[in-house]
Image (tube, rainbow, N blue to C red):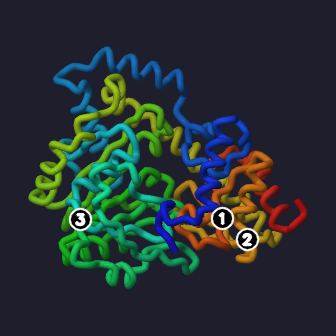
Amino acid sequence: MSPTADGAAPGTVAFNARLEQARTAGLVPIDLAEADPARAGLSLDAREVEALLGASHATAAGPEPAGLTVAREAVASYLAGHGAAIAPDRVLFSRSRDAARRLAIAATCEPDDELLVPAPARRVLDPAGGALQSVRLATYGLTFDGRWHVDRRSLRRAIGPRTRALFVGNPAEPTGATVSGDELAFLEELCEERGLALIGDEAFLDTALEAGTTVARATRCLAVHVSGLTGICGLSQLGAEWIAVAGPQPLAASALARLASHPESAAPPPAPVLPAVPALLARREPFIEALRARLARNRAAIATASLREAPWTLQWGGGGPWAVLQINPVQDVTALCLALLGEGIAVRPGDLDGLPDSGYLVVSLLPEPRLFVTGLDRLEAHLRGIA
């Protein structure tokens, strides 16, 4: 089982290329592979966002980059709402979620160090990540026993002499595994014991079905929270993502010093955006409520299908915008997804997200519910052989 798209079978890699071509051509009206809330019609009102950007930029004062101080304070306040006490000067901004992940890895790993990533999971490290290509990836397991979570025994066995950090999704993609308070305590104790850092990609933390526990609450080990306006406000187009460094002061200071000369630390979001971060975060609740409602409605559609014995089994975590469907392993997953794509319906083959190369599909819970149900119906028809 591969933890990344890089290890996927050639057929599913080809599917990914076909999907992007079809999207570009406008041939995917029902996109059950969508990862961006904004493209699924979930975002703050565009006119309000434009007004906030204009007003905040006009009133911003202080040294460049304009608005950095107030933006840092706003992120610290957001994390305080999740029970984490983070000093504003421990917050750094970047222009994309991938760039924020690279910053988090650069803060915790040196070249030739090892980063532990979960399996199954979506690709963590962009192959085009420059110097970070020298960071070695190894895997630890997630396990499913009614809900996805970290396999603690697998994680302990995976730690080697070069391991410097471990990565968790919270919620993880695509499994939806979340970090509970008990699990955070285990991870923090393990990292302190073995001298490791903890990185948490928490872009969709606010979708957790139970109160989300951010890794930024860690106090005994170095921990790096990754998030941004994409998951919190549905504003991927603004290019305002961030990391927040938690943990003991000496460890945090060392991590921040490593980032001082990092090229992406010197490339903050565009000038109008940072001053608007406080106002945008202050208006996040309507977006989050709409996002939660959308995810809940589409989860209910899968549950309703399951009641009529649809040809799949839902493997669910505790949050996030994805669902894992286990299907008959004799089904050719790539052929199925290509056939659906030919009808304008996108569904992800499971091995693109580190699941086995047969028997698994991944669907996004972000699409508008009417389209989502139509997509599910067509998927069911194909699985029953009546398409």
Answer yes or no: do the residues labelled 2 and 1 have beta carbons within 8 Å? yes
What mark, if any, has residue 361 been given in the picture?
Answer: 1
Would you name the residue on which mark 2 appears? 312
Count residues near mark 1 (Cα–Cα under 10 Å), then give few for <14, some for 14-19, many for 20+: many
Count residues near mark 3 (Cα–Cα under 10 Å), then give few for <14, some for 14-19, many for 20+: some
Q: Total number of numbered labels?
A: 3
Image quadrant in which you'd find residue 269: top left
| Amino acid beneath label 2 | Trp
Residue 226 lies, with reference to residue 52, above or below; the image says below
Q: Is residue 348 left or right of residue 221?
A: right
Q: Is residue 32 left or right of residue 65?
A: right
Q: Residue at x 28, y 68 (%)?
A: 114
**Between tags 2 and 3, which lies in front?**
3
The residue tagged with tag 3: helix, strand or loop?
loop
Q: Residue at x 66, y 73 (%)?
A: 358
| Amino acid beneath label 3 | Asp
Would you name the residue on which mark 3 appears? 112
**Between tags 2 and 1, which lies in front?**
1
The residue tagged with tag 1: helix, strand or loop?
strand
What mark, if any, has residue 80 been given in the picture?
Answer: none
The answer to whether one can see residue 86 in this image is: yes
| Amino acid beneath label 1 | Leu
